[in-house]
Amino acid sequence: MDKVFNLLIVGVGGQGTILASNIVTQAAMNAGLDAKKSEIHGMSQRGGTVFSHVRFGKKVFSPVIPKGKVDVLISLEEMETLRWTQFLNRNSRLILLNNRILPANTTEYPEGLTERIKAQFDNVISIDPKEYTQKLGNAKFLNVFLLGVLSNYVDLSEDCWKDAIEALVPQGTFEKNYEAFLIGKECK
């Protein structure tokens, strides 16, 4: 992989954003690539914004993705997508979980966010979390499910992903997490 792959993962506290970015970083390293990661999760325990830049390739010099250079954005919450559009370009792929978590001191969620996002970008995969939560058995596996979706768009072997998932998910949850990953692979 000569080109550096730029992935931005965004969400709110408690959604597994950091675990997902750790798994991607480990999967890239398992493939023998240079991988760098930068994350912010200061207010995550209070439902605040959590984001992680993940970059990997033959040689990566900085963990921070320049504005306009994201290849794939994984968003675990609709409104968080809007906060990061300056990092995208018209060809960026968005893997958008249509999840709505009301920000603090807010009583209603803005309508039409997904439609606005789809109008702005060409490659949007919009996913209904309710549909997949039922298949997965628990919403806690949605982050790894989304990595399964991502795996269709990056050149990392399934073994690299599997080993990273096994090494990083909480003890006793590997089977369910890996199953979630495989279900995600079917979602394109």
Image: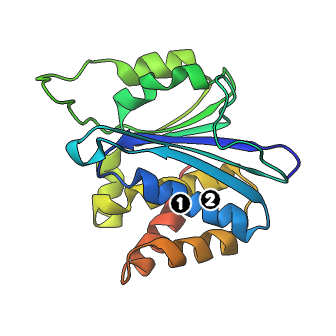
Position of 7 with respect to 76 (left or right) is right
Residue ranking furthest to the bottom: 172
Q: Please tell me how crowded label 2 is: few (under 14), some (14-19), or many (20+) other residues with Cα within 10 Å.
A: many
Identify the residue under disc 1.
22
Q: How is the image coloured?
A: rainbow
Looking at the picture, which amino acid does disc 2 mark? Answer: Thr
Q: Residue at x 84, y 43 (%)?
A: 3
Looking at the rendered structure, the kind of residue marked 1 is Asn
Give the secondary structure at mark 2: helix
> Residue 17 placed where, x, y %?
42, 50
Q: Position of residue 101 (x, y in %)?
A: 24, 36
Question: Where on the picture, by quarter, is residue 124?
Answer: top right
Using the image, determine if residue 64 lies above or below residue 185: above
Q: Can residue 177 be spotted in the picture?
A: yes
Are dots 1 and 2 in contact, CB under 8 Å?
Answer: yes
Q: Report the residue at 61% width, 77% height from top.
A: 163
Foreground of the two, 99 or 68:
68
Residue at the disc numbered 2: 25
